Structure formats: C-alpha cells, structure tokens
C-alpha cells in the first residue's frame, strides 16, 4: 500500500518511528511534512494529505497530531475521505472492516509507541468487508 503521512509539530517527534513501522509492514510511505517541530497549524497538513490521497487512487493516509482530534475533524471535511481516530488495534480494525476508512488518525499525546505499532499493524492487516457496511458507508455522504 502507498501511504501518505503528515503530522503537526506535536507529533513530529514520532513521525520517523511511524514511517519505519509502516515500511516494515511492507508499505511505501510518502512524507508530506512538516520537516521540523516548528509550530504549524494541523489543518494545513490535514488538507495537504487529503488532497494527495484523493488525487492518487487506492492510497491511504495517516495523520498524527497531539490528540488526533483536530486532524480527523479537518480531514473529514473532504468528500471521499473517511478519517478514523483510532486508539488501539480494535478501533483500527473496525475502521477498516466496517467504515472503509482511508485515513488513520491518532494522537501522539494519547498513545505510546507500542500501541501505535499495534494500531498500524491492525490497520494494514484488515480490509473493508463490504456488504451491509457498504450501504452504511454510502449513507455517510450527504
Ligand atoms: C497542538 O497543540 C494541538 O492542539 C494539536 O496537536 C492537536 O491535538 C489538535 O487537535
């Protein structure tokens, strides 16, 4: 899978670790910034990443900020993006299997590296189940 990744300053410190985790799982990872921990506004990076995912069919995104909340709120403004704020392997699995989420969000100040590893592993292992979930996912769009 080709996965775009972006953070804000709050999560810059774990971006390289998350990239390594994703690459070890066999993914191609494209880093959309930022390049330092200088203060930035999370919506700028959320919008940049969502534009990249929407313009590159079949790809996914990962957005990380302090809590994951701001990134998920901004990402979900994009039609065609289903951003899921995940806290553990189970929520990551459900986000893929039931919600067909294409952007994973989590908070650097909320989950530790061990949990991040299991979130990424679960996200990459599970696919959308379709069926009744496809009808529900369609209903998300207004
Ligand atoms: C930055 O301080 C913080 O507000 C941001 O990383 C994020 O948690 C917002 O939702």
Image: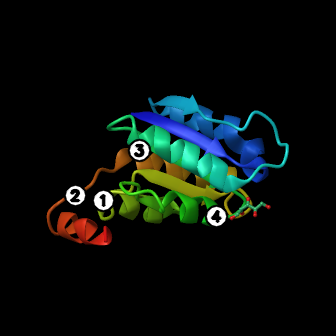
| Residue 53 sits above or below residue 140 on the image | above
Q: Please state which of residues 3 and 42 is positioned toward the viewer in this rendering.
A: 42
Can residue 65 be spotted in the picture? yes
Q: Which residue is mark 2?
A: 129
**x and y percentages locating residue 81 in the rendered image:** 41, 55
Q: Is residue 106 above or below residue 60?
A: below
Q: Which quarter of the rendering shows the C terminus?
A: bottom left
Q: Which residue is mark 1?
A: 97
Q: Secondary structure at mark 4?
A: helix
Label 1, label 4: how many angstroms apart (C-alpha)? 23 Å
- Give the mark nearer the N terminus: 1 vs 2: 1
Q: Nearer the viewer, mark 2 or mark 4?
A: 4
Could you give the CA–CA distance between mark 3 and mark 4, rounded to whole angstroms? 23 Å
For label 4, count other residues whose C-alpha is less than 10 Å away and answer few (under 14), some (14-19) or many (20+).
many
Q: Residue furthest left?
A: 131
The response on whether ligand 1 sits within 8 Å of label 4 is yes
Q: Is residue 87 visible?
A: no
For ligand 1, the image quadrant comes to bottom right
Question: Which type of secondary structure does the marked residue at label 2 adopt?
Answer: loop
Residue 124 disc label = 3
Identify the residue at image location x=40%, y=51%: 102
Residue picked out by circle 4: 70
* Earlier sequence position, callout 1 versus callout 3: 1
Dot 3 or dot 2, earlier in sequence: 3
User: Distance of mark 1 from mark 2, alpha carbons?
Assistant: 5 Å
Taking depth in this image into account, of 114 and 77 the one nearest to the observer is 77
């Amino acid at each position: 899978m080709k996965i775009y990744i972006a953070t804000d300053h709050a999560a810059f410190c774990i971006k390289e670790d998350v990239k390594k985790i994703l690459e070890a799982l066999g993914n191609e990872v494209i880093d959309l910034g930022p390049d330092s921990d200088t203060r930035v506004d999370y919506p700028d990076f959320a919008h940049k990443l969502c534009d990249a995912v929407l313009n590159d069919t079949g790809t996914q995104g990962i957005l990380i900020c302090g809590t994951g909340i701001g990134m998920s709120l901004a990402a979900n403004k994009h039609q065609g993006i289903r951003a899921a704020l995940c806290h553990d392997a189970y929520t990551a699995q459900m986000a893929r299997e039931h919600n067909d989420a294409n952007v994973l969000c989590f908070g650097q100040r909320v989950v530790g590296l061990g949990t991040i590893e299991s979130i990424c592993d679960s996200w990459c292992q599970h696919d959308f189940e379709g069926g009744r979930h496809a009808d529900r996912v369609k209903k998300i769009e207004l």
